Amino acid sequence: MVSKTSKYMSLSESDVLIFCGGAGDVGKINSTKVVQHNLDFIKTNNHTNIILVILPPRYDFMKSSCVNSEIKTFIRNPKKMAKVYQHSALLKMVNYRKPFTNHGLHLNCQGKDVLSKLTVS
């Protein structure tokens, strides 16, 4: 998590912060805290641009797993935040298996390249 009283306070309107969280942040206990912390950070840092990367499903679990269900619930909150705060935007990461490592949790080289290109565009 990013501190509200950190070096990010010196950023300007020409800077961009990218929040690219992982599925480890989506546990039932953590997800509410993570969403609230992100919301507080977005409110506090309205002087810079913020991009929220939407979590892809975890490919190391079945689609119907409770973790993937929680991810679906979790990503509703960034969508709401981006609508309310003009200095924030959403970036939807690819939603297919190929850009992920063999175990299905992390991005491989191709996935990192895709994420970089999406961020630039």
Image (cartoon, helix red, strand yellow):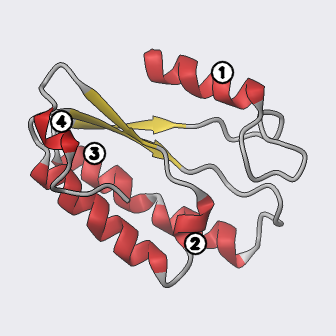
Residue occupied by mark 4: 87
Q: Residues within 10 Å of mark 1 (few under 14, many from 20)?
A: few
The residue that appears at 47% across and 42% down in the rendered structure is: 53
Lower position in the chain sequence, tag 1 or tag 2: 2
The residue that appears at 60% across and 66% down in the rendered structure is: 24
Label 4–label 3 contact, CB within 8 A:
no
Residue occupied by mark 2: 70
User: As shown in the figure, which amino acid type bears the numbered disc 1?
Assistant: Asp
Number of the front mark, 1 or 2: 1
- In this picture, is 40 found above or below 79? below
Q: Residues within 10 Å of mark 4 (few under 14, many from 20)?
A: some
- Which residue reaches farthest right? 102
Number of the front mark, 4 or 3: 4
SS at badge 1:
helix
Lower position in the chain sequence, tag 4 or tag 1: 4
Disc 4 from disc 3: Cα separation: 8 Å
Q: Nearer the viewer, residue 46 or 86?
A: 46
Lower position in the chain sequence, tag 3 or tag 2: 2
SS at badge 2:
helix
The residue that appears at 11% across and 52% down in the rendered structure is: 44
The residue that appears at 65% across and 35% down in the rendered structure is: 94
Give how far across and how far down residue 1 sits, in percent.
38, 60
Lower position in the chain sequence, tag 1 or tag 3: 3
Residue occupied by mark 3: 82
Give how far across and how far down residue 16 sits, in percent.
28, 28
Disc 4 from disc 1: Cα separation: 25 Å
